[in-house]
Structure formats: structure tokens, C-alpha cells
Image (cartoon, rainbow, N blue to C red):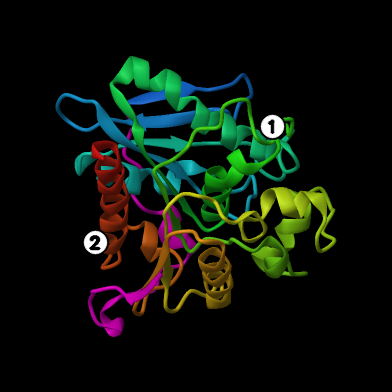
Amino acid sequence: MLVATAPSLAAQEIAVMDVGDALAMPRPEPDRLIRYGPQPQQFGELRLPVGPGPHPVAVVVHGGCWLAEYDLGYMSALSAQLAAEGVATWNVEYRRVGDAGGGWPGTFHDVGAAADALRRLARDHDLDINRVVVLGHSAGGHLALWLAGRHRLPADDPLRGQQPLAPSGVVSLAGIPDLAGYASPEGCGAAVPRLLGGIMAEGSSRLRRTSPIAMVPLESPQVLVIGQNDPIVPRDQADRYLAAAVKSGDRIRLEEIPGAGHFELVNPASAAWPTVSAAVRDLLESAVDLQRR
């Protein structure tokens, strides 16, 4: 375990972004818009690096309190920047709370299907299926961690999928790994009961199958990146999960960005970006090292 304060600008040099700033970020066009299912929200944006493959891949999962009001667009700038740095990106959309079929269990089915669709995309777009990092922000950080752990669900669990993609690692940006601990009557936490279809009893089957803190060990390396001044996801989410993951034997580290809020972590123009980019590269390089052994 490593808990680190990221090398970054001083706290006062990082302007804390709000949701309006995030939604106003540039939205570069993808190279391909590809459907992975028949529902309107079942598609993703594929961006490819310049040059020949096979390319490593980041599956990008947006947040927004799991709610239909927020879509994948605010992760487009991050996805384009990673592609410019040599990592193909698959920025996925999925049914959310408020969409027909969203919430329980559709949100989980969609995110799993989108990740598993990489096998087909790899054949058509020269992607390296053995070098895949899942990167998610906020509620998408929860879903990214869940994707890494779903292979541990029973084989007959419909949330697991028939052949769940095994990522090389996970980067959780201001993620929400403890659903029960995040649920609240107000704010983003109010969406948790709706995500789980109203069943929130501690130790319930739905929590055990969907909350990363209840699913450890995920058996994938993980990097948790948090902002020091995040007003949406409290620090104790990361701390509790870190302790549980370490105890389970998972390889994990925590990076805190001084002065950053919730949205700097997805802004390639912010001082947080070098830490995010390095986390993706480190996990992909670790995957290469394992292949060489």
C-alpha cells in the first residue's frame, strides 16, 4: 500500500471546478461512435492513437450520480487526451437512474456489456485486449471498480456476464466504493437507493454484489485519485475502501491532489492531469511486465 500526495502545483494554484465548469469543457468528436446494444444509451465513443497498433485501451466510465441528467460528454476531453498520449479510449454510455431500464439492474448490465464489447472492437480496431485499464469518475469510479470485481460473482449471477473482461487495473477518480456509506437523504447520495431499486439493508444481496468495498479482493491493481477539497465525495470513502482492499490483499495506492476539488481530476488542462495520466501508464506498463514473465 502506498498513500501519496501527488507532485503538483501548490494548493492555491489549483482553481476548484464546479459541475458547470465540467459540463463546459471541450467535447472533441470521437473517431467512431459504436453501439454495443439496441437501447438508445447503449453506445460508446472510440478514440484511437495515431499510428499502428495494437493499442492499449482505457475503458472510460462517466459519473453524474448515476442519473440520466448527466452523460458521457464531460469525459470526452479526458478521452481525447489519453488517445493523444497513445492510449485508445472507449468512453461508454449506459442507462442511468431515470432512463427506461436504468438503475437496478440495467445500469450494471450495460456497463458490463460495454466493457465486454472490447473483444469485438479489438478485432476491428487493432486494440490490445491484454492491456486494458478501466478509468471512472465519481459514480463512474464506483462502476469502474465494480467492473474489475464482477468476475468474482457466482457464475450464474446475471450481473457477472458470461465472460467478464479482466482489466489490467483500475483508476478510480473521486470514486464511490462504499455505496452504503455514501447513501444519504440529500445530494448525490440520494441516488444510491434508486440505483439499487430501493433495497439498501446492510448486508443485502444487492449491496454485496455491487458495492466494491463488499467485493474485495477485486484481484486487479488499483489507483485511487482524490482531490483534497472534494465537496461531493468525502475523503472517508477512499480511506475506508483503501483499508478494506489492503486487508484483502489487493494491490492499491491512493494519490491525493493538493487543493483540487471533484472535477479537476477529469480536466486534462488541470494540475491534476499528470497524476491521472501517470496512473494509467503505470497500470498498463505493469501489464506488459506481467506478460513478459
In this view, the residue in front, 144 or 22, is 144
In the image, the segment drawn in magenta is 1-30
- Give the residue at x 26% y 68%: 271
Q: Is residue 221 left or right of residue 98?
A: left
Q: Is residue 18 left or right of residue 248?
A: left
- Give the residue at x 66% y 55%: 211
Determine whether label 1 and label 2 are within 8 Å by CB. no
- Give the residue at x 64% y 44%: 68
**Mark 1 residue crowding within 10 angstroms, few (<14) / some (14–19) / many (20+):** few
Label ID, residue 274 = 2
Q: Secondary structure at mark 2?
A: helix
Examine the rendered structure and indicate whether residue 3 appears above or below residue 46. below
Give the Cα separation between the discs numbered 1 and 2.
Answer: 39 Å
* Residue 31 image point, x, y percent: 31, 27
Membership of 11 in magenta stretch? yes
Q: Callout 1, which amino acid?
A: Ala
Question: Label 1, on which residue?
Answer: 155
Instruction: Name the dominant secondary structure of the magenta segment.
Output: loop
